[in-house]
């Protein structure tokens, strides 16, 4: 781990039932299954808050065997650390990777039977494994934050004019919020202007978050790669398949990767055979999610009023059974 210490950084994230199921397989399911964690209905709303579509939280849990929840990134990190056992080695920045070898900024060289690069969007391991093609700038910026004491707010996603906002309840009477639109990074005045077009719950939640606690960054992804591995080195999560957040599958797919990699390496085959099985199980699914997330971004960030009206009408008149099948395809693609 490059950081000198692990701290609960970041804001919140959504865990759909497939992500919760993966957490359970990794021995960290309590962070989502605890009664303290509110269930969400995944509602879609107009900018003024009028519901377009939603799901019964109990129905989601019955259908998929796990809930849709929001968790703080720090809580998820703590749960995974507890389940992992031995503590990670911190302050260890990787500068170079070879077949079975990792070079650290300290000058130390480590060797292993397997190297897994889970080092994010600008992965050093990826550069050696499959090349150094850069991430793709979507042109979208996202603001995120966690507001205290707002556990009674409505959950869901609000669709505005070229802008989307979301509220997701967290344990401890907190609310994770996000606002995304095409624009420049870090423009607080533009954030305020965009938020003013949404209903009172969104405005109040963003206003209740101190400016220093608001996170802003550009959104990137990469086209699906035709391989992730080289020798006994492979990739996982954003290092392998960074995606836009508009399907809520970034964290979920990384957790699924971890389960699939463990399964592929646990059947007694060689490392190379295990990595081939891992890729066969994961690359087609994550490629579909990367493409689907781009499509979802285009739908959510429509600008023209006429197109937004058509979108809202279509979403609002889609039968719940069909919406549930659409969700099922995303969760099990």
Image: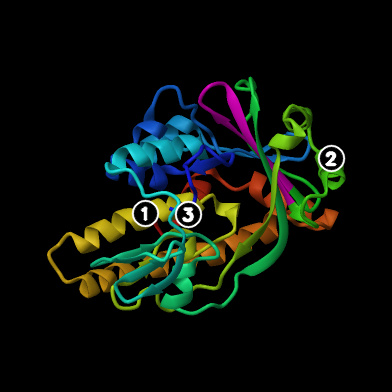
Identify the mark nearer the N-term, 1 or 3.
3
Write down the residue under mark 2: 192
Q: For the point 36% across and 58% down, which residue is it?
A: 257
Relative to 9, is 186 on the left or the right? right
Identify the mark nearer the N-term, 2 or 1.
2
276 or 87: which is nearer to us? 87
Indicate the position of residue 279 as horizontal and vertical percent values.
33, 70
Instruction: Answer above or below: position of 307 versus 229.
Output: above
Give yes or no for residue 19 being in the magenta stretch: no
Q: CA distance from mark 2 to mark 1?
A: 36 Å
Indicate the position of residue 222 as horizontal and vertical percent values.
56, 70
> Marks 3 and 2: which is nearer the front?
3
Identify the mark nearer the N-term, 3 or 2.
3
Magenta region, residue range: 164-180
Q: Circles 1 and 3: CB distance less than 8 Å?
A: no
Q: Residues within 10 Å of mark 1 (few under 14, many from 20)?
A: many
Q: Secondary structure at mark 2?
A: helix
Q: Circles 3 and 2: CB distance less than 8 Å?
A: no
Q: CA distance from mark 1 to mark 3?
A: 23 Å
104 or 220: which is nearer to us? 104
Write down the residue under mark 1: 256
Tell me if I can see residue 129 in this picture.
yes
Q: CA distance from mark 3 to mark 2?
A: 34 Å
213 or 17: which is nearer to us? 213
Q: Residues within 10 Å of mark 3 (few under 14, many from 20)?
A: some
Q: Which mark is residue 315?
A: none
Tell me if I can see residue 328 in this picture.
no
Q: Which mark is residue 2?
A: 3
Give yes or no for residue 170 being in the magenta stretch: yes
Quarter of the picture containing the C terminus is bottom left
């Amino acid at each position: 781990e490059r950081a000198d210490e692990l701290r609960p950084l970041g804001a919140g994230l959504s865990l759909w039932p497939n992500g919760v199921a993966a957490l359970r397989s990794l021995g960290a399911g309590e962070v989502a299954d605890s009664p303290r964690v509110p269930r969400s209905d995944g509602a879609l709303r107009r900018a003024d808050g009028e519901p377009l579509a939603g799901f019964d939280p109990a129905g989601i849990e019955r259908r998929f065997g796990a809930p849709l929840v929001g968790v703080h990134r720090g809580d998820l990190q703590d749960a995974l650390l507890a389940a992992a056992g031995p503590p990670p080695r911190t302050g260890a920045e990787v500068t170079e990777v070879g077949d079975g070898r990792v070079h650290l900024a300290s000058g130390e060289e480590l060797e292993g039977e397997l190297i897994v690069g889970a080092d994010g969007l600008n992965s050093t391991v990826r550069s050696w494994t499959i090349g150094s093609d850069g991430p793709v700038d979507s042109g979208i910026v996202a603001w995120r934050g966690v507001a205290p004491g707002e556990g009674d707010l409505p959950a869901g996603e609000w669709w505005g004019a070229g802008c989307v906002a979301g509220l997701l309840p967290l344990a401890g009477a907190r609310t994770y919020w996000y606002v995304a639109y095409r624009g420049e990074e870090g423009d607080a005045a533009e954030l305020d202007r965009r938020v003013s077009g949404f209903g009172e719950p969104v405005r109040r939640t963003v206003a209740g978050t101190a400016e220093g606690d608001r996170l802003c960054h550009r959104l990137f992804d990469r086209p699906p790669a035709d391989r992730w591995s080289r020798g006994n080195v492979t990739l996982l999560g954003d290092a392998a398949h960074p995606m836009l957040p508009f399907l809520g599958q970034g964290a979920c797919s990384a957790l699924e990767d971890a389960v699939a990699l463990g399964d592929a390496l646990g059947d007694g085959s060689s490392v190379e055979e295990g990595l081939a099985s891992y890729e066969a199980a994961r690359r087609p699914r994550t490629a579909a999610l990367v493409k689907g997330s781009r499509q979802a971004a285009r739908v959510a960030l429509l600008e023209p009023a006429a197109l937004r009206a058509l979108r809202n009408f279509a979403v609002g008149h889609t039968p719940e059974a069909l919406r549930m099948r659409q969700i099922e395809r995303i969760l099990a693609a």
